[in-house]
Image: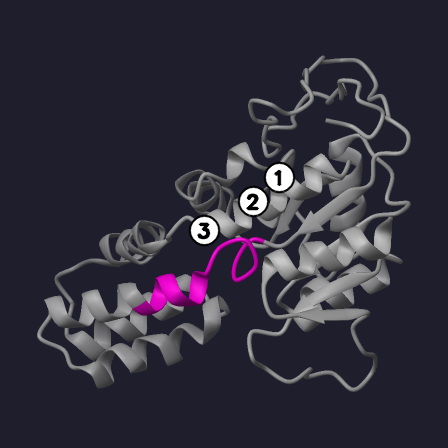
């Protein structure tokens, strides 16, 4: 619920298909087409990344790589090659499918089939994390509105959200494909706030990408918590406001710092 204990009704304009509705137990959201949004004062936004922030994408891809390689007579080295070729999700999917086809001799598999396996197999390997869901609930109980800001395709990112049960834990989401803008462009953070019917005043960002999440949030004037995942900070131009080793720890930092 909100800090004041009242229900929030947030109005969305037509065409907000990439925004998810709040789950049961949340303030009730209504979509009123053709009418202006209403802002609810004193309700800060907690903007969060999806891959390797709310879900362990790296772990899911590693599991898929081992399964895929083993099913085709490959070795542990082949699975490791798949993980390297994926570049932590940054490799363009069509290019990745092409090099996988060449590596494993899958000329008869077809690009569409391999792309479907890449995407569907990854979702299949995502494991819901109760600690992440609990941290989101803690944020909500403290009066914050968790809202996902993620790069990627609408269909794939929404599949991950729903498979992990996170669509029931966040107020909504903005996905770069549907938004027509990608992190680190600060415009996507402003769009997320607009679609949530809130202000960016008092908002925070949590994410694992130094450039896309923390750099983008910094450009939008937002403090952030970087999930280091055991990595050193890679940028010389600035330092993150805070770092954390897990999403629940990042949420506790925000709640303590954000009042």
Work out whether residue 190 or residue 139 is closer to the camera in this orientation and state it: 139
Q: Label 2 vs label 1: CA separation?
A: 5 Å
Residue that mark 3 sits on: 129
- The residue shown at (12%, 62%) is 108
Residue displayed at 88% across by 47% down: 202
Labels 1 and 3: the sequence-earlier one: 3
Residue 169 placement: quadrant: top right
What residue sits 27% from the left and 72% below the top?
A: 100
Q: In this picture, is 173 found above or below 116?
A: above
Q: Which residue is label 2 attached to? A: 134
Q: Position of residue 187 (x, y in %)?
A: 79, 51
The quarter of the rendered structure image containing the N terminus is top right
Q: Residue at x 83, y 79 (%)?
A: 238
Q: Position of 184 compared to 126: left or right?
A: right
Q: Is residue 111 above or below residue 21?
A: below
Q: Is residue 58 magenta?
A: yes
Q: Can residue 91 be seen here?
A: no
User: Can you say whether 14 is above or below 87 in the image?
Assistant: above
Q: Is residue 150 a member of the stretch shown in magenta?
A: no
Q: Which residues fall within the magenta stretch?
A: 50-62
Q: Are marks 2 and 1 in contact (CB under 8 Å)?
A: yes
Q: Is residue 22 left or right of residue 42?
A: left
In this figure, which residue is indicated by the disc labeled 1?
137
**CA–CA distance in space, label 2 to label 3:** 9 Å
Residue 131 falls left or right of residue 116: right
């Amino acid at each position: 619920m909100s800090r004041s204990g009242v229900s929030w009704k947030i109005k969305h304009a037509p065409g907000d298909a990439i925004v998810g509705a709040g789950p049961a137990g949340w303030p009730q959201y209504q979509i009123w087409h053709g009418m202006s949004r209403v802002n609810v004062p004193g309700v800060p936004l907690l903007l969060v990344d999806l891959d390797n922030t709310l879900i362990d994408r790296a772990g899911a891809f590693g599991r898929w790589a081992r399964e895929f390689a083993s099913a085709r007579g490959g070795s542990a080295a082949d699975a490791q090659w798949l993980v390297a070729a994926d570049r932590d999700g940054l490799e363009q999917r069509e290019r990745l499918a092409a090099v996988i086809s060449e590596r494993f001799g899958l000329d008869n598999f077809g690009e569409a089939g391999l792309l479907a396996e890449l995407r569907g197999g990854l979702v299949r390997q995502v494991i819901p994390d109760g600690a992440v869901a609990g941290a989101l609930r803690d944020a909500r109980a403290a009066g914050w509105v968790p809202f996902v800001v993620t790069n990627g395709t609408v269909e794939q990112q929404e599949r991950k959200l729903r498979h992990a049960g996170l669509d029931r834990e966040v107020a909504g989401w903005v996905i770069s494909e549907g938004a027509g803008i990608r992190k680190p462009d600060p415009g996507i953070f402003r769009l997320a706030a607009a679609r949530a019917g809130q202000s960016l005043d008092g908002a925070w960002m949590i994410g694992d990408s130094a450039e896309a999440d923390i750099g983008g949030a910094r450009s939008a004037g937002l403090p952030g918590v970087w999930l280091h995942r055991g990595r050193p900070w890679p940028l010389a131009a600035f330092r993150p406001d805070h770092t954390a080793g897990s999403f629940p720890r990042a949420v506790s930092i925000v709640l303590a710092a954000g009042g």
